Image (cartoon, rainbow, N blue to C red):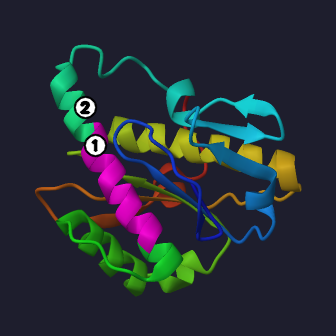
């Protein structure tokens, strides 16, 4: 999770990097325990939003493929994390797609919003909807901790075989989705 463009690492499947912009003290409230691979609020363990929304869609995928996807997603996330912390550039095609999106949409990163970075091979309607739900759950957490509701959600999609793109999830779903 990247909070206010400050970074807390996440190892969720598919290489998510979650960016919450515009909340100054949020990172001091939520921490990431790298030994246990979990988020904490004080001593309380917080569940991963990605895991809460797991619908078993990967249950039939070869474990070696899942491991490869996880490692690649983690690598890309680390590149983004390093860049946002130090301005040191990464080397993957997906990183440079992110960098292009980041530099051409600075006003979004300077606003109050939630951005979820995904390395899915396809950004299907069901995956975008799941990402929207994930952003809403992050927003509920931000509101609980800070009293501030963001209500603006984006997905940065970084596929390996085509150009990455920024998707305005709030615009696509009109602020509402059918559960």
Which residue occupies 22% across, 14% down? 60
Chief SS of the magenta region? helix
Which label belongs to residue 71?
1
> Would residue 73 appear left or right of 138 to someone viewing this image?
left
Q: Which residue is mark 2?
A: 67
Crowding at label 1, few (<14), some or many (≥20) Cα neighbours within 10 Å? some
The residue at the far front in this view is 35
Is residue 131 covered in magenta? no
Q: Position of residue 103 (x, y in %)?
A: 40, 85
Secondary structure under tag 2 reads helix
User: Could you tell me if the residues under marks 1 and 2 are in contact, i.e. CB atoms within 8 Å?
Assistant: yes
What distance separates the C-alpha of mark 1 from that of mark 2? 6 Å
19 relative position to 22: left or right: left
Question: Percent position (x, y) of residue 31?
Answer: 70, 48
Q: Which mark is residue 101?
A: none
Tag 1 secondary structure = helix
Q: Residue at x 40, y 67 (%)?
A: 80
As displayed, is residue 80 above or below residue 131? below
- Along the line of sight, the residue nearer the viewer: 135 or 33: 33
The front one of 46 and 107 is 46
Residue 105 visible in the shown view = yes
In which quarter of the view is residue 149 placed? bottom right
User: What residue span does the magenta drawing correspond to?
Assistant: 70-82
Residue 90 % position (x, y):
29, 72
């Amino acid at each position: 999770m990247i909070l206010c463009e400050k970074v807390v690492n996440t190892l969720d499947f598919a290489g998510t990097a979650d960016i919450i912009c515009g909340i100054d003290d949020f990172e001091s409230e939520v921490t990431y325990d790298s030994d246990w691979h979990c988020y904490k609020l004080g001593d309380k363990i917080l569940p991963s939003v990605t895991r809460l929304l797991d619908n078993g869609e990967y249950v039939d995928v070869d474990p070696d493929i899942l491991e490869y996807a996880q490692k690649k997603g983690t690598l890309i996330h680390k590149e983004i994390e390093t860049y946002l912390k130090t301005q040191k550039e990464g080397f993957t095609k997906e990183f440079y797609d992110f960098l292009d999106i980041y530099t051409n949409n600075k006003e979004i990163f300077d606003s109050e919003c939630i951005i979820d970075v995904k390395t899915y091979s396809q950004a299907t309607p069901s995956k975008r909807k799941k990402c929207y739900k994930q952003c809403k759950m992050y927003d509920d957490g931000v509101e609980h901790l800070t009293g501030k509701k963001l209500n603006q959600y984006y997905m940065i999609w970084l596929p390996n075989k085509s150009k990455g793109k920024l998707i305005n999830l709030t615009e696509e779903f009109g602020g509402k989705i059918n559960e």
